[in-house]
Amino acid sequence: MSKLLICKMKKHFLKVCYLYIIFFLFLSSHCTPNLERNVLEYSGLTKLFTLKNLTGNNSSTTTTLSSAKDIASYSIPSLGINGIIYGTQINLSSDTLTSFTPLVARFTTTGKSVTISGTNQISDATANTYSSNLIYTVTAEDGSTQNYTVTLTAPRTYGGSSLVIWLKADSLGLSDGANVSTWSDLSGYGNHFTQPTGALQPMFKVNQINNLPAVQFRMATAQIMRIFAGGTNLYITNSGSLFFVFKLIQTSASGTTILNINGGNGREMSLTDPADQYLQCRNGVACAQTSGVSIPLNSYIAIGSIQNLNTTVNELWNGDLKGSISAAGGNFDYVAGAAPGTSYLSNGNLDVDFAEVLYFNTNLSQNEVDKIFCYLRAKYKLTATTTSCGN
């Protein structure tokens, strides 16, 4: 084959290649929907095709990594409880838990991954023990992180299982306006409050606080509920912790009792009139103001009273400390309660709406107190300066 023929064949081949390139450029410039249409640039020196757009910039695709890192839902299916998500705090409570064993959570997240202390967390798979708060770290696609604190409040485990009265309006399941003849105790001790006389029975009302119900006591009809006999472990020592969520309407000059344990000479929590201040009392002997601060009327509040033997009595509102007094002396000694195994909620002179009542026959630790108030604040949407949920 002559050199002339080979040269002609090379030229012909290059012309064909150039025609294919022109055809491809035509398709690229007319078929690409992007306004900056891509073309192929040919480098005769290196015979390298580079994809470029008509503006002269190299074509590239930019992907923005998501910064989403929320926990959108949280529950523990084995206990049948759902978490209340309040910012980066997730609160759960159990009526039935009496000891802490590993539990599996179900959760949804907008993040890429979820860990606890570096251990990957898988919804419906990873088990954790909730005796202490859990810190979940959610990592987004862009690498940013957000911590969530999960608190499981289990009142029946606190104070050495010292919860002996737990009354919840949302456990009653009654219709609006129905009389309450029995308010069942959830502590596990069976300390149920009853009232067989219809005219003295308080009333169940729906949608009273955060879409939850309450039980209304009115002094006009001397409404009262009792443990008439057989109450279990109501008094062990002079220590005791009472928590209640209520709306105070008014007090009575004749004396307004919130809760009495063991009748005459027994432990009693009351209110002054007309100042509406909280009192720690030995029934029939003496009372003492624990803060001297008036309780606001017609507004729901969670109040706690914690007595440590004959040392101190502390009063707290929504978790904030309002006052502390000495518990020294016989006025804070209830060993001589005249009617062991009895209790009454209201003495007939109480105008309040109760949402929840918890009574422990010992003084709780600060960590346990914080967890109780954390639970009550989240459930009833109460506010406080203190935001601690324990540890």
Image (cartoon, helix red, strand yellow):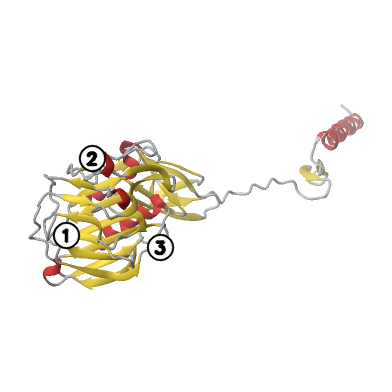
How much space separates mark 3 and mark 2, taking CA atoms? 39 Å
Q: Nearer the N terminus, badge 3 or badge 2? A: 2
User: What SS does tag 3 mark?
Assistant: loop
Kindly tell me whether residue 309 is visible in this rendering.
yes
| Total numbered labels | 3
Q: Residues within 10 Å of mark 3 (few under 14, many from 20)?
A: few
Are dots 3 and 2 in contact, CB under 8 Å? no
Amino acid type assigned to the residue bearing label 3 in the image: Ala
- Residue under label 3: 384
Q: Is residue 13 left or right of residue 306?
A: right
x, y percent for residue 57: 78, 50
- Against 133, is 121 above or below? above
Q: Nearer the N terminus, badge 1 or badge 2? A: 2
How much space separates mark 1 and mark 3, taking CA atoms? 28 Å
Name the residue: 8% across, 56% down.
Answer: 338
User: What SS does tag 1 mark?
Assistant: strand
Q: Residues within 10 Å of mark 1 (few under 14, many from 20)?
A: many
x, y percent for residue 148: 42, 53
- Residue under label 1: 267
In this rendering, the label closer to the viewer, 3 or 2: 2
Amino acid type assigned to the residue bearing label 2 in the image: Thr
